[in-house]
Image: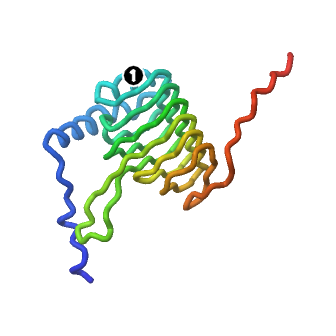
């Protein structure tokens, strides 16, 4: 059994340029990004753009958000990213417009090939399409697409694409129901 796994060889080869960018981002910029409070979200947006992220207008990024590689991040207009979100983006993470990513969500593009002796790093892009909501503490795995209008329930683990305008929940996440948007009701008169 000992001869079957050899983790010492599980070293992913990154170029010097990528390693340098990751080092500077992680140790010099990310700590500042991490602690800036929500009202200074505009500074976070500027910082992300300076590091190669494509970020739309009206984006709110709360504190303690972790972004592994900003140059692999695309965020549409009017998006809210909650406190403690972890964007572990070896591959591109694309977030459409008018999306809510609630607190402590983990968007994870990376995994390891557990069937290979060296368990090499593998990564696949994540797409969260417009009008979606990812509720608190959800985990979205590598290669997953949350299609337009999708809702992922709190603490769910999503390892497969979800249909548009559906609510999924659980571990593993399963379709619970269709998402139906009610018409706006007239506000009661005061």
Q: Which residue ends up furthest to the left in the rendered image?
A: 16
Q: Which residue ends up furthest to the top in the rendered image?
A: 190
* Residue 130 horizontal/vertical position (percent): 53, 35
Task: Identify which residue, 177 or 45, lies in the foreground.
Answer: 177
In the image: residue 31, left or right of residue 105:
left
Is 150 above or below relative to 76? below
* Residue 188 horizontal/vertical position (percent): 85, 21
**What residue did someone put label 1 on?**
43
Quadrant of the rendered image containing residue 189: top right
* Residue 148 horizontal/vertical position (percent): 55, 39
Q: Residue at x 51, y 46 (%)?
A: 146
Q: Quadrant of the C terminus?
A: top right
Q: Residue at x 46, y 21 (%)?
A: 57
Q: Which residue ends up furthest to the bottom in the rendered image?
A: 1
Q: Quadrant of the N terminus?
A: bottom left
Quadrant of the rendered image containing residue 23: top left
Is 28 above or below relative to 127? above
Q: Residue at x 35, y 53 (%)?
A: 110
Graded by Cα atoms within 10 Å as few (under 14), some (14 to 19) or many (20 or more), the crowding at tag 1 reads some
* Residue 58 horizontal/vertical position (percent): 50, 22
């Amino acid at each position: 059994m000992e001869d079957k796994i050899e983790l010492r060889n599980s070293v992913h080869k990154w170029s010097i340029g990528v390693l340098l960018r990751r080092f500077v981002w992680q140790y010099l910029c990310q700590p500042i990004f991490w602690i800036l409070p929500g009202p200074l979200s505009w500074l976070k947006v500027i910082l992300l753009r300076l590091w190669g992220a494509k970020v739309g207008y009206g984006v709110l990024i709360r504190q303690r958000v972790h972004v592994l590689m900003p140059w692999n991040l695309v965020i549409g207009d009017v998006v809210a990213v909650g406190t403690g979100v972890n964007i572990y983006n070896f591959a591109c993470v694309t977030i459409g417009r008018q999306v809510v990513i609630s607190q402590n969500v983990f968007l994870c593009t990376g995994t390891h090939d557990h069937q290979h002796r060296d368990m090499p790093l593998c990564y696949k892009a994540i797409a969260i399409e417009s009008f979606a909501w990812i509720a608190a503490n959800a985990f979205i795995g590598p290669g997953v697409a949350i299609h337009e209008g999708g809702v992922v329930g709190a603490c769910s683990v999503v390892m497969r694409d979800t249909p548009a305008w559906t609510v999924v929940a659980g571990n593993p996440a399963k379709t619970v129901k269709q998402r139906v948007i009610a018409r706006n009701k007239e506000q009661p008169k005061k």
